[in-house]
Image (spheres, rainbow, N blue to C red):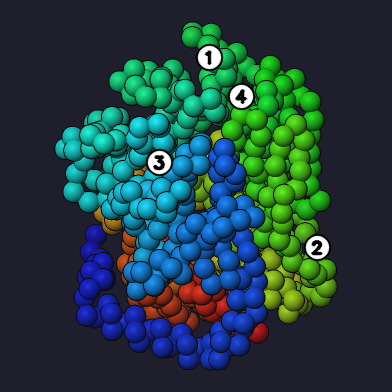
Amino acid sequence: MEDPYIWMENLSDERVLRLIDEENRRFRDFIGNLGDELFPEVWEYSSLPALQGAKLTEKGVIAMYKERDRQVIRWLGGDTIIDSKELERELNDEVLLQGFTADKRGRFLAYSFSIGGADEGITRIVNLETGEILEELRPSVWDVTFLENGYYFSRFYRHGETPDGVKAPAVRLFFKDENGERMVFGEGLGSGYFLSLGKSTDGKTAMLTVTFGWNRADIYTGPIDAPELWKKVYSAEVPAEAVDVISGKLYVLTREGKGLGKVIAIDGKSVTEVIPEGEFPLEWAVITGNKILAGRLVHANHRLEVYSVDGEKLDEVTFDLPGSVHPLDTDGKRALLRYESFTVPYRLYEFEGELKLVEKQEVEGNFRVGEDFAVSKDGTRIHYFHVKGEKDDRKVWVFGYGGFNISLTPRFFPQVIPFIKRGGSFAVANLRGGSEYGEEWHRAGMREKKQNVFDDFVAVLSKLKGEGYKVAAWGRSNGGLLVSATLTQRPDVMDAALIGYPVIDMLRFHKLYIGSVWVPEYGNPDDPDDREFLLKYSPYHNVKPKKYPPTLIYTGLYDDRVHPAHALKFFMKMKEAGAPVYLRVETKSGHMGASPETRARELADLLAFVVKSLG
């Protein structure tokens, strides 16, 4: 099939750079000074401290925060270890911290950062006592797991091939010590496979999960310091993850059965069901103080459940607001949990037999978090949250995703608070393709069933339109696919569209950057059967002249996960069809985000676009 804009996949083509320059100016003309006027307010909420991670060590807790104009890694309540502003001065560029880990004894820290929000960056290993940089790994690696005499790490190959000759993208596990690095796992694994290494809380057992896409899992265990002895102990055609090894038993959270999640214990050849499937999905589990602490998702809202290691339910904890709760770390005695909601950037809780609040950050104001259901084309009920303030001017900004087994649970969006304070409201739609109602819910929104996701979104948008709301539809990444597909199919259900860092050309996504790893989720464009259903909804191939609402397509030049050409090519097709379409390209932003100020300016511009488009 002929692609008139294939030349836009070359981001150094002068025509592409000229277009970006012209369209950034045209977008600025459209929103006028509104983005600049809204920026101080968005910056105020963006600047609220947000906890991004925490790690328990024998010397105390190390935590990572996003603060006003920087990100920091510091001892909880104590000294700063890493400051992104200092890194920016060192490198003379914008820096985004991606994550960190530390060894149990609090001797070493591994942290990763990138320039301009790219996925590919740098990982540094630091001696926490002296501050000395011991190692610098490029490109960045993940899953750093410290042993006494070295550490494991996963390297994701984006270019070229792996040491065993497999073409990128592919992942391999390495061990590094004073004798250098050696590959210890992953030989022969192709594109679409991912590795995740964990260590039992007693530090003795490796728990390695090999997943294919977002759909199946194999779990290997063995002595942490002898990878040659690791053996496959569990395999499933559904997502699964190792929880811990206690007294020789491997505890696994698996989606086997109806796909709602259960905990099993594996002891040699014997498998025992510990926590059975319930009515709602079990999203995560950790073992701490001889108890299993688990997060259950009830209509996209987390509650905590406490069980004995034999599966007896001991307690249940709910929160004052619908929210998201995830474990950050556990050392076998206690666990650290992070809570977030629409008006709560974060709360840090500690669980040691009971839940205790450590610190929090909340937004003052009179907000209401409502919930409702819309009915999709095939009769499926679709849950959504609807957040309102003191007044309701019947304008709603709706966020959706619907894919990759990711659930959209309540979280803090800095640009939404100023919108609500101006009489707007905010909705989050829980569509098929996510994990809000288990693995069957995920599978009902992938591959040839992807159309269900768009129908679900149409149902939510239509219901809100029917209640007299003007609707702005918003999605990012796979959510950008959601909004662009809904836009080309049913432009009548929205009054504005915001499409961020999107996947849009469904016949070429697998040829751009790391796109081939999404084949298990979307299907393979080179397979004639898959190509047929992909072509039916591929937004890039379904733009026809019709009445479109104001549309903003935005991306970042540093996005090395979803190629910016998806956004650029779709923009050209929409412009050709006479649509009122605008393009915003951030030159210092990647898929993972950007520095705090760059990110806040982008959010202020999104808010300006919504305010201007909805009137």
Q: Nearer the viewer, mark 3 or mark 2?
A: 3
Q: Which residue is tagged 4?
A: 263
Q: Which residue is tagged 2?
A: 368
Disc 1 and disc 4: Cα gap in Å? 16 Å
**Image vertical order of residue 516 relative to residue 186, above or below:** below
**Image vertical order of residue 595 relative to residue 505, above or below:** below
Q: Which of marks 3 and 2 is nearer the N terminus?
A: 3
Say which element carries label 1: loop
Residue drawn at (57%, 42%) of the image? 59
**Image vertical order of residue 234 relative to residue 445, above or below:** above
Disc 4 and disc 3: Cα gap in Å? 26 Å
Tell me the quarter of the picture where residue 397 sits. Answer: bottom right
Asked whether the viewer can see residue 531, the reply is no
Say which element carries label 2: strand
Q: Earlier in the sequence, mark 2 or mark 4?
A: 4
Q: Nearer the viewer, mark 4 or mark 3?
A: 3
Q: Which residue is tagged 1?
A: 248
